[in-house]
Amino acid sequence: MREFVVLGTASQVPTRTRNHNGYLLLWDGEGLLFDPGEGTQRQMMLAGVSASQITRICITHVHGDHCYGLPGVLSRMVLDGVQHPVHLHFPASGEDVVRALVSLASPGLDLRLHPHGVGGMVAPGLEVRPLNHRIETYGYRLVEPDGRTLLPERLAAAGISGPDVGRLQREGRLAGVRLEDVSVLRPGQRFAFVMDTAACTGAEELADGVDLLVAECTFSDDDAALAEQYRHLTAGQAGDLAAGGDVGTLILTHFSARYEDVEFLAAQVKARAGGTIVLAANDLDRIPFPKRQRMAG
């Protein structure tokens, strides 16, 4: 199962309808929790997800609205008796803050800290790229390995059926027939998380060709000066990011409290997002990962 669960969508301060940041990506057997702000533990209960589903926690930067919920989440995992290792990824320059937050949590969790100071792979299939914010910030990108989709008509023509199909997949060749002769390339699904940044190369690299992009949309195009001052994206810039990366679906979040209704932000994004599907997130949304659409010959 692959699903994106929105736990909070507010930037800097919560509102009556929007909690601080918090996002859980359910990806097959893993649960990746991104930027747990205050109240994340409660939002998880309201969204119907369990702390025991978390296997990795990914923090983009150590501003409070992106990490102050960490002690509560960790304590809840201890209370729930989580036995599996939990990996915590974060910028190296924020290690003192992260360790202070971890020290507030109940002991007993097999928590493994992974600070990173440069872009690159931080776990199998998971990579980071530096963003352009007021403190050291990284976005995340998760990539499934490419595979192959078998074509029944080609298998039948080659006389391969039953257990021999599995053998061909394992060995790559059977009785002179190659796997690539009876299949087409299936590009792995891709996810990216871009938060708290001005437009930059790192954001573009993260968004390139992803099926699902989660991006901040803090300010409207009319407030571009504020976005530049605080190093955030405007709605139009979020749209440009999606269009430039040929993104399949874009989820907007991290809205400034100055906007009560964010649909006009979504409209500004759509005007520049090309063929990308654009969704303005609400707290507690549960969004299925987009179905595979991109195939190659």
Image (spheres, rainbow, N blue to C red):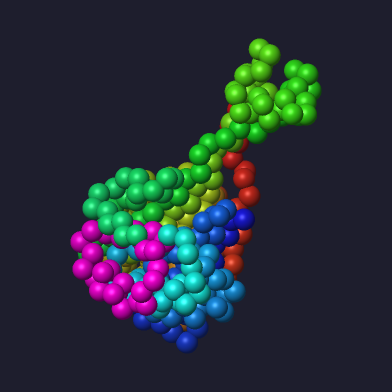
Residue lying at 39% horizontally and 48% vertically, measured from the top left: 123
Residue lying at 42% horizontally and 45% vertically, measured from the top left: 124
Note whether 285 is above or below 296 in the view shown: below
Give x and y (percent) for residue 162: 78, 29
Say if the magenta span includes residue 98: yes
Outermost residue on the bottom side: it is 16
Residue 282 shows in this picture: no
Q: Is residue 153 left or right of residue 245?
A: right
In terms of depth relative to the viewer, which is nearer, 82 or 22? 82
The quadrant of the rendering that contains the C terminus is top right
Residue lying at 39% horizontally and 71% vertically, measured from the top left: 108
Task: Examine the image and state in which quarter residue 188 appears.
Answer: top right
Please provide the residue range marked out in magenta: 86-111
Give x and y (percent) for residue 235: 42, 64
Residue lying at 34% horizontally and 72% vertically, measured from the top left: 67
Task: Examine the image and state in which quarter residue 57 appears.
Answer: bottom left
Q: Is residue 183 left or right of residue 187?
A: right
Note whether 274 is above or below 269 in the view shown: above
Note whether 250 is above or below 180 in the view shown: below
